[in-house]
Amino acid sequence: MKISHLLAAGEDFLIDLCRRIDREEGMTGGHEAGNRVVKLSDQKTAKFGEGVTASEDATQKLAHTKLDPARVRVPKVHRFFESTTAQTGRRVAYLLMEYVPGRTPTDADLDCEKRAGGLVSRFAGIIASLATIRGSIPGPLDDGLSDGTIDLSPHPLVLCHSDLYRRNMIILNDDDDNDGLSIFLVDWGPHGVLPAVL
């Protein structure tokens, strides 16, 4: 199926496709008891589950457009929709995005002094890049957490990825910039704009 047809397909078709791939080929990411990630094609992947939210969609889109891709890249979101399951009546959301072929940083990467020094400085740069994106209401992008009763004015509100673990970083070997490496930051679920207190 062409990518343009995949992205324009009906929601029922995409739901069935995600479930079939998950059942027949298994997940490429996520958790057995939570959100699941399946590879739809060599260029597209889908994340789906009860924990996928409109806020994740909004945050990932913001990060994709605002962050410097020379420092860190974020998979492009192509489509987001929600559905209610017939069996349970629960809401399940689907996030279709760019598939990133690569690997997570390994212990071997961090044990090699030359590679580790480069990766650690790159990770620090990623955190600094996130802090350049400012917001005005703390919390997830679709609905802030603050009702105005807490004075956060001493601290600027910046974009935070609150789950910076190796499993949420994908190293893509390429021959372009960045010493042959591009780092993608994935899983923008529980994140948003928070006070910069570091």
Image: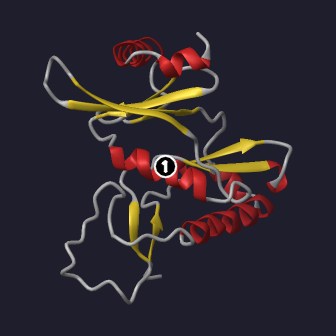
The residue furthest bottom is: 154
Is the image coloured rainbow, by chain, by secondary structure, or in one colour? Answer: secondary structure
Q: Which residue is mark 1?
A: 60
Q: Please name the residue shown 29% across and 41% down the image.
A: 51
Secondary structure type for disc 1 = helix
Q: Please name the residue shown 51% across and 54% down the image.
A: 62
Quadrant into which the N terminus falls: top right
Asked if residue 119 is positioned above or below residue 177 in the image, the reply reads below
Q: In the image, what residue type sits under mark 1?
A: Gln
What percent of the width, then of the height, locates residue 24?
Answer: 44, 11
Image quarter of residue 178: bottom right
Q: Is residue 32 visible?
A: no
What percent of the width, then of the height, locates residue 11?
Answer: 36, 19
Image quarter of residue 170: top right
Mark 1 crowd level (few <14, some 14–19, many ≥20, 10 Å Cα): many
Work out whether residue 111 or residue 67 is closer to the camera in this orientation and state it.
Answer: 67
Q: Is residue 127 visible?
A: yes
Asked if residue 27 is positioned above or below residue 154 in the image, the reply reads above
Work out whether residue 184 or residue 140 is closer to the camera in this orientation and state it.
Answer: 140
Work out whether residue 118 or residue 130 is closer to the camera in this orientation and state it.
Answer: 130
Asked if residue 111 is positioned above or below residue 42 in the image, the reply reads below
What percent of the width, then of the height, locates residue 155?
Answer: 41, 84
Question: Is 182 situated left or right of 127 in this image?
Answer: right
Question: Is 30 situated left or right of 87 in this image?
Answer: right
Q: How many marks?
A: 1
Q: Please name the residue shown 53% across and 68% down the image.
A: 133
Q: Please name the residue shown 67% across and 59% down the image.
A: 68
Question: Is 65 situated left or right of 49 in this image?
Answer: right
